[in-house]
Image: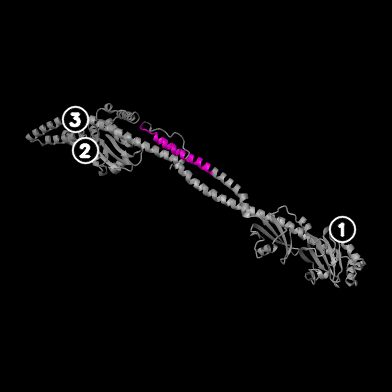
Amino acid sequence: MKFQKKIILVYTIFSVLITGIFGAAYYTLNVRQYKEREYGNIRTVSNVKLQQMEDTLESMESAITYVLSDIEVLDALKKLATLKTDSYADMYFSDSTATVRAKINSYYLMEEFYRMVFFNKNGRTIANNNYTNTALNTDASYQTYPWVERVSGKGGRNVLIGLHEDDWGSRSKPQVISVVKEIQGMEMGYLEVQKDKASLDKMIANTDENITYIFMTKEGEFLYSDARQVKAEYYWNLMQGRDKDIEEIETADGEKALCLMQESDTDDIVLMTVARMDISQSAAMEVLPVSLLLLFVALALSLGYIYLTSRQLTRPIQQLQHFMETTRLDNMEAEIPEKISNDEIESLYVSYKDVLNRLNTSMLKEKRMSLLSLQAQFDLLQAQVNPHFIYNVLNVISNRGMVSDDEVICDICSELAGMLRYSTNTKDKYASVKQEIEYLELYLGLLKHRYDYKLSYEIRIDEALYNKPLPKIVLQQIVENAVNHGYGSSSDIIRVEVAGALTEDGWFLKVHDDGNGITKEKLDEINNNISSIRNKLTNDRSSVELEIGGMGLVNTYARLYLLYNDDLIFEIRPGKEKGTDVIIGCREKRRQSAEDLSIEQRNDKNV
């Protein structure tokens, strides 16, 4: 699987989880808010209906107070309590009856209530609406009144009687609720105020047919409901012992519903508001579409962002891949095509370029080593002429020396043969410092036979340098140059010192002579030739073996530079007192210019 697809997959899973969690939280929060809103709506309408019923009952009680607050009415009621007559006509047309009838027939009472009726133990009954449809039943009396026991002995307190048929009607007996009061003193009788169900239904009219209002007394007796048939006792028993005022319940028919129970603070009534609805399902239907839409939008936006981000993140990698695929030997030095916005990916670019640079350096070094090998072979072919012929000649000379009993001739031939074997060996491309020292000692031995006491040399090399690589015949060339050019035809003692040691930055070898020294003009000429050779090897990368010619210092520098590149230490300078110093070496820990090397200090410390 590609890296971009992995990024998309991982972050898609993460996005789905996070979006799902937030979606679930959003859904839960909105369901809770929906329920709280519905609960609030039910409480609001319930408060309104409870207030309306409280106002109705208060008006019914006020009507009783209104009648009994009249002194004339109270006097008339006393007289009716003591009136001795069995004639309905006498009772109906008496002054006391007229006084009471006049009071209860007031417009306010006639319009506001279905019936207001007075009755006592003597059978005296007076009603305010004794018309055709609401005519009073003349047979009805105190003895037939079903609520006497409930209202008697209550100390004059108003008694609320729930929905029932009108007890006094002769023709129609509508459903009514009543407030009955026992008139205190001398058994003056009772006063009842009725409110018919039709008026109550009109007052409690509800636009939502799924809501039912059930009024109960605080003792659990049914008072009124706007529904035709309602199992008030079922809901009353269901809501008993509940901690909350509103609960999710099942109706008597098995439907999901909300039931709110509220008690009146002023009257002996309790309102149960039953809203037939599955609140959880309603909340889901209300909230779920919006939640799913928001979830889909959020998920789509997050997936789009993930896709664009993954492309942005993987684009540098794709560029790096293309850059790597198009890299060839002829364009390894090509620069990064554009600025990479991602620091880590840019670091990969830089690392890859560093690898290319090291590879290019290694290839260049290998080319230079090949050039060095070719140059060495060319020089050796030029020098050896016919090694076998020379070996044969040396053997003839050595034999003649032995015949003549001249051991010096034998030693010279042996040393020269050793030098020829070393110089003509083309098996190895380069030699070690130890091999170079051994070859140099053979060469100095030959010179000793020539100059005898006039030649003095000393070799002090740290053994830690023995395995350091060098091109062949480097030290011999430097020493030969010191002997040939440092002294010329002078008769002075020829002194040559070869020293070598490790430093903090690498290692070095120094060849010192006590000769005439080197002139500034000659030193400038050599340095110019060295700069020219370095430019050809570094920038032009052209073959310089024919131009180098000979076996001088420039030749030595060229071969050393091909081996060590910019890490090479190569310096020619006048000695401290006289003569010339030639210093070669290699920086191994860090690079710096030859001028920054305190070679004199290291010489004094290590040599």
Residue that extends furthest to the left in the rendered view of this protein? 403
- Badge 3: residue crowd in 10 Å (few <14, some 14–19, many ≥20): some
Q: Which residues are magenta?
A: 302-329
- Above or below residue 151? Residue 387 is above
The CA span between labels 2 and 3 is 27 Å
The label shown at residue 524 is: none
Residue 294: give x, y in percent of width and height: 58, 46
Task: State which quarter of the image contains the C terminus.
Answer: top left
Residue highlighted by disc 2: 457
Residue 129: give x, y in percent of width and height: 86, 61
Q: Sequence-wise, which precedes: disc 1 or disc 3?
A: 1
Question: SS of the residue at dot 3?
Answer: helix
Indicate whether residue 324 is drawn in magenta.
yes
Residue highlighted by disc 1: 107
Q: Nearer the viewer, residue 478 or 1?
A: 1
Residue that extends furthest to the top in the rendered view of this protein? 547
The CA span between labels 2 and 1 is 153 Å
The reply to whether residue 439 is visible in this rendering is: yes
Indicate whether residue 281 is drawn in magenta.
no
Residue highlighted by disc 3: 384
Relative placement, left or right, of 38 versus 11 is: right
Q: Nearer the viewer, residue 536 or 170?
A: 170
Name which residue type carries label 3: Gln
